[in-house]
Image (cartoon, coloured by chain):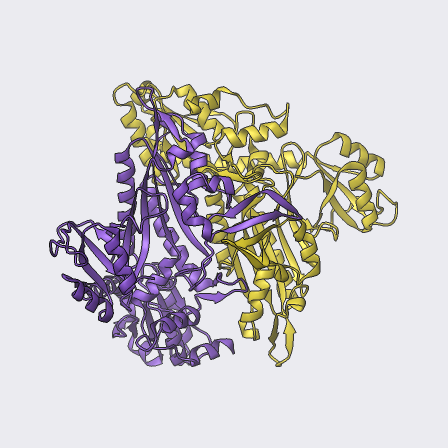
Chain colours: A yellow, B purple
Amino acid sequence: MAQEKKLVEAITSMSEDFAQWYTDVVVKADLIAYSSVKGCMIIKPDGYAIWENIQHELDRRFKATGVQNVYMPMFIPESLLQVEKDHVEGFAPEVAWVTHGGLNPLQERLCVRPTSETLFCDFYKDIIHSHRDLPKVYNQWCSVVRWEKETRPFLRSREFLWQEGHTAHATAEESEERTIQMLNLYADFCEEVLAMPVVRGQKTEKEKFAGAEATYTIEALMHDGKALQSGTSHNFGQNFSKPFGIQYTDKNNQLQYVHQTSWGMTTRLIGAIIMVHGDDSGLVLPPRIAPTQVIVIPIQQKKEGVLEKASEVCERLGKTMRAKLDDSDKSPGWKFSEAEMRGIPVRVELGPKDIEAGKCVLVRRDTREKIECSLDEVETRVAELLETIQKEMFERAKAHRDSHIFDAHSYAEFTEIANNKPGFIRAMWCGDEACENKIKEDLAVTSRCMPFNDQEHISDVCPVCGKPAKKLVYWGKAY
Amino acid sequence: MAQEKKLVEAITSMSEDFAQWYTDVVVKADLIAYSSVKGCMIIKPDGYAIWENIQHELDRRFKATGVQNVYMPMFIPESLLQVEKDHVEGFAPEVAWVTHGGLNPLQERLCVRPTSETLFCDFYKDIIHSHRDLPKVYNQWCSVVRWEKETRPFLRSREFLWQEGHTAHATAEESEERTIQMLNLYADFCEEVLAMPVVRGQKTEKEKFAGAEATYTIEALMHDGKALQSGTSHNFGQNFSKPFGIQYTDKNNQLQYVHQTSWGMTTRLIGAIIMVHGDDSGLVLPPRIAPTQVIVIPIQQKKEGVLEKASEVCERLGKTMRAKLDDSDKSPGWKFSEAEMRGIPVRVELGPKDIEAGKCVLVRRDTREKIECSLDEVETRVAELLETIQKEMFERAKAHRDSHIFDAHSYAEFTEIANNKPGFIRAMWCGDEACENKIKEDLAVTSRCMPFNDQEHISDVCPVCGKPAKKLVYWGKAY
């Protein structure tokens, strides 16, 4: 009954109400359920399977660069959180505090980690002594808690899943190199696996991470023209190693402070996938991340031989890809809608006449194109189709993104774009935080990043104050 | 420097002080570090890699039985924890309480999950309506918190990692079947992967899980003769579905309460591996769980061609197993000790003379046996050796376990064994909790389980009260 009710209620259309469309998809595609803990979500099997695929692929790429996984405690003593001043100011207002263990009050309050820089620093202080102990390139997969007031599934919730990498290096060059290396790894992952184009760049001073010397980011554009920060990589320099006293003796037997980085990606990426690729029929998953890549749906399955053949086809496909058979007693039309809602990249339709003719029909989720296919070739054809879909989904998302980047040469033009054209605004910036603040106050637009590619200069003056400007900034409304 | 200090201090011998030996191994084999949060540990890369292997193999076996992974919030509202009476009584005294979110006190306290029965019940109540929604076979990988007073790395810590499976079924038969299925899966995993023999059985009423109708357990014997509960599987019957109101309409359109189970395994298994297989030189890891299965150690590595050959051999091995090369500038003897401390199943020694003769030396970690091996055959020989080691480690552990099971026919005999012979004590039991309590009070021995194999009757009377006894119980001192 529950399942039937679910699909009868159509989802809101994107153009009508994007926020409601998003919430509908998240729930009706069975990715999450709301829990009895305000602001915390339950990630259901279909949602968690996407996260498992993200984890698996990111972890593989991490390990190829020498990352080692560890696990740190989920609690941080209040005094430890306070060691680095900017950091505690940034996080203390939004942490959850544990005050009692069992029936007794604790001597010192513990916060549930909002991020683990302080724990890693405390650890590194104990295990780093010599230059031979460096670098340390550790990562952990865990959940973190930030007591947000407004929450939305995947995008902003009080508890979310992530990975946090924390590294320590002998030199400033090495830590900068690792910071950029991980940002690029994130960007490549988004583009190659999630089919999601990103802009790589540096955050302004105002927008950087609490305690960082420099924060780098990848910014993606959602279908409604809003930006989503999709991964960040921070170079701390010696901002943490000095207050925490993380020192090593170098080759000349001199004591030096280490240089550190941290970098993270979260379940927010699932929100990004939904908002970059989804449509009015639900999710559209890139094949490389889809828990089910192809679903076989028999037509007139009660006719002799249909279910057997469908099952055989599914088994053959299952040898090289993630394949499922829908042999439930629902109608084929119902199954099609369900497969669309869940974003399965390819469905194979197979009825008695198809079987007689030795063929089947492949249907692409992204374009809905129908393709006749000989049953003998089904594995290779579906495999090729998955590659094509992956490639074309990226190209479509990139074309959409590129057509939503607007250049502003004056403040009037900036205002006009901010008010009427959803997307990224590219404009020069003098570097003065006052101009950045004015834009944010006037137009509810924030600086997303200063792109790495310095060639992208579009003028020589800041559109706000008119002073000389050397930096290009991508601005946008953001999640 | 830190690394050199580590191995110079030899570890305490097992026979001298088993508890200290355990702590030494855990720290010196680089599995954990102590953190600034009392009772919480840091799992270092070598420790976490073992957990990753456990996760990977268990998860694969779970999924083969239809388990789906989800993620539930880490917080439980106090009112939700209180819904099932036995459950809250069992856990409330040892939970950590969150009382503040950011700067504000919470309206209702939240406990950090000690286990998630209540959250799953709250969820199932919302998503189960019809018999077609059943069964639900969900699992999550996460950390849980129990505010223990005495803690020991892996064995008992305030935060630990685990998986918790929670299922809902239409009938009592199905839930009993799933409970036993998962217990057997756990037992097979321990025996086949961890090379650790276990006794499968049921817990007494006194020892069962808070809220369960029946708790099943696998119990392993550590090298010091103490028992370690290594995995449990609970049948809840309708104990939770009734207070939580989890109902479905059956095929006759009648409302029924679901039948539920839960089952879990934890990072405690790493403690078990250490205490079942370790020796006075450190860890001894079963090949199937070892993060590094074979390490290649070059002798006189500065001589021309040695490092190249060692590297080539490592690369060849790496194609089919987890292989590493130790090309650090430490002495070979030092490298041998380190590889032994870390429990690497096989090391390959390779010097200039070996290379000239086209051979190398394989050394087993478990028996220290040295085996000459032609370089041409190194992959197949090492692969065979890993199989042999896995098999023989299990056989040795089983022989040790079997030689430490003692039958007690009278209370005098029971007392004599409890005081003088470390191991399991098998004795009949009348079923009266008073007798169970007397044994615990007099001898600090607890009932570990009532084995499934009912044939193991050793007498007809309870050694405590002399009344007729039909149940055999394994008793022991336990971690």
Answer left or right for A76 relative to B249.
Answer: right
Placement of the C terminus of chain B among the 4 image quadrants: bottom left
Corner quadrant of residue B225: bottom left
Residue A33 lies, with reference to residue A73, above or below; the image says above
- On the image, the x and y values in percent for residue A458 come to 79, 44
Q: Is residue B419 above or below residue A99?
A: below
Tell me which corner region of the image, top left, top right, bottom left or bottom right, holds residue B53: bottom left
Task: Tell me if A434 is positioned left or right of A96 in this view.
Answer: right
Write the residue at 35% across / 80% down: B352
Farthest residue, direction right: A466
**Residue A177 visible in the snapshot:** no
Vertical order, A87 against A43 (above or below): below
Give the number of marks.
Answer: 0
Q: Between B456 and A313, which is closer to the camera in this rendering?
A: B456
Q: Residue at x 52, y 25 (%)?
A: A281
Is residue A81 shown to the viewer in this render?
A: yes
Residue B374 image position (x, y, % from top left): 26, 71
Left or right: residue B430 versus residue A396 is left
In the displayed structure, A293 sits above or below A125; it is: above
Residue A186, how many percent across, how many down?
A: 57, 49
